[in-house]
Amino acid sequence: MSIQATTPLNTNVNSKTIKSRLASIDVMRGIIILIMLIDHVRERFYYHHPVTDPMTIADTEPALFFTRTLAHLCAPLFVFLTGLSAWLYANPASKPKRDPSEFLLKRGFVLILLEMTLVNFSWFGSYQTLYLQVIWAIGLSMIALSVLCRLPRVWTITLGLIIVAGHNLLTPITFSPQEFGFSFWTIFHDANFLITEGPLRVKVSYPVLPWIGVILLGYSLGPLFSRDLCSKFRKVQLLKLGFSSLFALIVLRGFNIYGENASGFQVKTG
């Protein structure tokens, strides 16, 4: 399934263009960092300000509602761009292709280590509870991609779509802490405490399964950013994908057809 074989090529590529970065990706990263910064500053300085579910409009101030709504873009785009960046690393401009597995594996473990040490300490200044959040999820996703990137592209696209579109179907599957499979399911699907007793409690706040699907889709979309591809064709394809995804979101969530059903939504607490 090769885009390069069926799409127009960019015949105006020169050495200067090849060496330049893809500005659109950097701009997107910058926008997401700014949105994340606004939300994290709010959470840090108003940490003790009691809030209910921000999606409950009647009980939520407009500023909180909109900052939290925008913050929903951060983690998905960070993970998606991680997958895209992995493809760009594996396919450098005017250089031989290289295997991204070792690159992804090492950086995945580094991110997990940072989550468990620097990130947690910077938030709370102590280690009564270890929260495994978005940095942990990105790290585990990179480790998973280090293996799955060896699959043919048609398989990475298919697997990514199945996970992203279908992981909500697994919601009825639950395990109690005493049951076999509880730890596995907590890491991959259900946010919960892995360890509740002892000197250090461990809470999985970002189950990793959906993020594996997102990083796979980011990696699979990489060929659209090939230097050999016409930029006009790329923009058209991205607009089609973007508008079709927004339409699907509006239909599925606007009518509460599928996803996080409003009637059954509960905020899990420790």
Image (tube, rainbow, N blue to C red):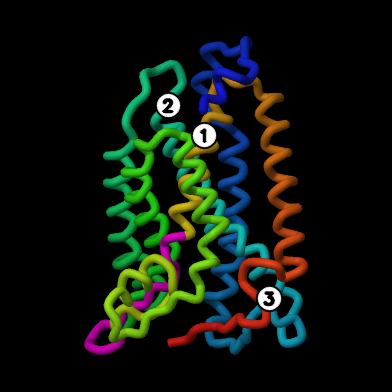
- Residue extending furthest toward the left: 198
So how many labels did they put on this image? 3
Mark 3 to mark 1 CA distance (whole Å): 35 Å
235 lies above or below 245: above
Q: Which residue is pictured at 32% across the width and 50% down the height?
A: 143
For the point 72% across and 38% down, the residue is: 239
Residue 251 picture quarter: bottom right
Pointers 1 and 2 in contact (C-beta within 8 Å) = yes
- Element assignment for label 2: loop
Is residue 90 in the magenta section?
no
Circles 3 and 1 in contact, beta carbons < 8 Å = no
Residue found at x 60% / y 19% = 6
Q: Nearer the viewer, residue 203 or 66?
A: 203
Lower position in the chain sequence, tag 2 or tag 3 = 3
Q: In the rendered image of this protein, does residue 103 appear above or below residue 130? A: above
Circle 2 residue: 91
- Residue range of the region highlighted in magenta in the rendering: 196-209
Q: What amino acid is at disc 2?
A: Asn
Task: Look at label 3 and name its amino acid.
Answer: Leu
Which numbered disc covers residue 64?
Answer: 3
Image quarter where the C terminus lies is bottom left
Foreground: disc 2 or disc 3: 2
- Residue placed most toward the observer, 156 or 103: 156
State the image coordinates of residue 128 (x, y, percent, origin top left).
31, 84
Is 16 left, or right, of 135 in this rendering? Answer: right
Q: Which residue is mark 1?
A: 222
Q: Are marks 2 and 3 in contact (CB under 8 Å)?
A: no
| Residue sitting at x 61%, y 42% | 27
Left or right side of 142 for 50 = right
Residue 62 quadrant: bottom right
Q: Of the residues shown, which amino acid type is indicated by label 1?
A: Gly
